[in-house]
Amino acid sequence: MFAEEKILIGCNENANVFLLPKLANRHGLIAGATGTGKTVTLKVLAESFSDLGVPVFLADMKGDVSGLAKIGSGNDFITRNRERYGLDEKGFKFREYPVEFWDLFGQKGLPIRVTLSEMGPVLLSKILNLSEAQTGVLNIVFRVADENSLPIIDLKDLKSMINYVVENKGQFESQYGAIAEKSANTILRSLITLEDQGGNDFFGEPALELDDFIQVDDNGNGVINILDAQKLSLSPEIYSTFLLWMLSTLFETLPEVGDMDKPKFVFFFDEAHLLFDDMSPEFGKKIEQIVRLIRSKGVGVYFISQSPADIPDDILAQLGNRVQHALHAYTPKDQKAVKVAAETFRANPNFDTAEVISNLGIGQALVSVLDEKGAPTVVEQVDIVPPQSHIGAIEDDLRAQLINISTLKSKYGEALDAESAYEMLLTKIDSNPNIESEVAPEVLEEVKAQTQQEAPEQPQQEAPQQPGAADVIGGILGTVLAGQQQTKRRKTRKTTTEKVVEKAATQAATTVTREVTKGIMRGLFGQMK
């Protein structure tokens, strides 16, 4: 942005190309082959929005976007363009930006967690690549949980619920239809894979509140939220579905604001093809609806991908601000992609757009934005202005320091283990006086043996006790309900009474939020059957 109340994207010998803040919520596209300068363009736009006081969310796929948190420095390329286009007179100055680091795995940023109830069965089915029949069984599991007030917060909750529904399917099938054990087993196996991909870290509480992304610092600069996606990119279904969940939740929870002088929030969706690859027509329509309407909530969405051809036409038509870096036409498929990219621009009579796209240098781009009347401008070939922050990744020590001083660390730093379906089913079974007669003898003997092995760990002053129902159930639940041993807790387990006393206020607020969001997500992506 520099000194002007508009966003300078690039320059050439005849013109400066600006993005108008009041039209920035009409969405945009940054496209180009690997290594052509998309990341620099992303950083320039993020910096400019932050200068305007607009919070930003973006994903860091390679680690180099983290440089936004460190003051920039010059090189020959930057110095040449600063002098060539008089950028210093326009207000260019090296600086750092306010950043919050996030990580779904809690390793390179504050942990991000979402409850499975918030995610809902339809989006979860997308992550797990379930068939229609398997999704139907998952829908039933969530419905039973809802109607019995059994919150599904994490994966152990879901495993418990699946086994509970299957083992009691006789009482549920008359209301919901057939519950195929084969489909349930497939879901359970898929959940094991999801655990291997970090699902135990991602699904849980405290759940992310998106309002924490929409912040400004003490100087009025928009906070740039950076999701570390280097490890996450290896799990594309989790990555794309999480970003889709974010976008959908913003759409449903933010109020209508009408036309604004600048966006309320800007969302960059990197590697956008991961969202659209193999997407069903139903999902595509939902996303098209969100993109079309979310601008009235003051949110601008910018997709980043190699080619405009990666974006469905109905969505591409809504992206009014476009930056196209080089595409190389080595194959017939590449040539088609170049043609598609050229056709998305309003032609400039001074050059052949398709030919220029194939010959752009690093840091150069074709740019077209919306003018004051909302019409696309004639495409211009420009040099993208340099970022004012550091180019490249920051040091691990600096990242750790910024994470440690974050005001949100106390809120999200430690996982919580609230009462949910797992514990409630434990209580449900524990209250059954005939439980020991309902469990296979060999299972009961195994659980008793495990309980006796653990007995020496009890305080010395306590008299030895025979394993009762509560002791037995701790092992039974792992075998009969969840199919695995109880997950080691990050904190010492407390009794139900202690949890209720200590967490009552927090859980009440969390429950209300979870139920509202759950309804939102299922309204967007289909009601449970």
Image (cartoon, helix red, strand yellow):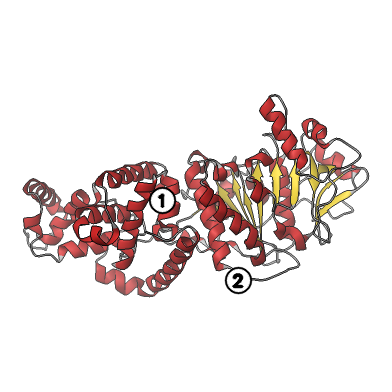
- Give the residue pinned by disc 1: 201
Mark 2, residues whose alpha carbon is within 10 Å: few (<14), some, or many (≥20)?
few
Residue 268: give x, y in percent of width and height: 64, 51
Q: Does residue 451 appear left or right of residue 413 in this picture?
A: left
- Location of residue 193 in the rendering, given as x and y in whole percent from the top left corner: 37, 41
Tag 2: amino acid: Pro
Q: Position of residue 188 (x, y in %)?
A: 30, 46
The quadrant of the picture occupied by the C terminus is bottom left
Q: Specify the farthest residue to the right.
A: 14
What secondary structure is found at the residue carrying circle 2?
loop
Residue 115: quarter of image: bottom left
Q: Earlier in the sequence, mark 1 or mark 2?
A: 1
- Residue farthest toward the top in the current orientation of the protein: 330
| Crowdedness near tag 1: few (<14), some (14–19) or many (≥20) residues, C-alpha within 10 Å | some
Residue that carries the numbered disc 2 in the rendered image: 255
Q: Residue at 66% x, 66% y: name it.
A: 296
> Which residue is located at x 30 percent, y 69 percent?
499
Judging depth in this view, the residue of 256 and 14 nearest the camera is: 256
